Image: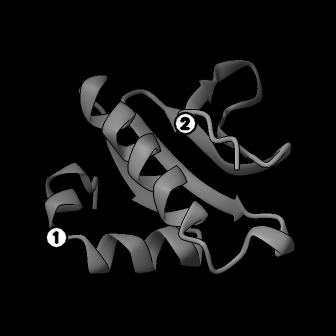
Amino acid sequence: MTEESVRHNTAKSRYELEVDGMLAIATYRREGNIMTFDHTFVPPVLEGRGIGSRLIAGALDDVRRQGRKFVPTCSFVVAYAKRHPETQDLLAV
């Protein structure tokens, strides 16, 4: 399995993680210092391998590095934030 790091594709307003030649993505809208995560997609053949969690962890690490906050509107990101109390300080709500 070939895995890359989570990368921030600012041109497409999304975070990406390529695994086995397939792309998992988390899209967002940005207003000022707030990033609203509105959709997460993991190819069905990659589901159940923690790819989505790795993607969101990497995205939120980048949010922290940038000094920004986030709003989870995507159900996957909402659930991730609830399971990871270390992200609570990044919540804009």
Reply above or below: 92 against 17. below
Reply above or below: 54 against 21. below
Q: Are marks 1 and 2 in contact (CB under 8 Å)?
A: no
Q: Secondary structure at mark 1?
A: helix
Residue 30 placed where, x, y %? 54, 35
In depth, the one of 10 and 32 nearer the eye is 10
Residue under the point 65% across and 21% down: 10
Other residues around mark 1 within 10 Å, as few (<14) / some (14–19) / many (≥20): few
Please state if 71 lies on the left or on the right of 64 as rendered: right
Residue indicated by mark 2: 6
Residue under the point 58% across and 29% down: 7
In which image quadrant can residue 87 be found? bottom left
Mark 1 or mark 2, which is nearer to you?
A: 2
The total of numbered circles placed on residues is 2
As drawn, the residue found furthest toward the top would be: 11
Please state if 86 lies on the left or on the right of 29 as rendered: left
Name which residue type carries label 2.
Answer: Val
Labelled disc at residue 70: none
Name which residue type carries label 1.
Answer: Pro
Residue indicated by mark 1: 85
In depth, the one of 82 and 92 nearer the eye is 82
Residue 89 placed where, x, y %? 14, 54
Residue 50 placed where, x, y %? 53, 69
Q: Secondary structure at mark 2?
A: loop
Residue 81 placed where, x, y %? 33, 70
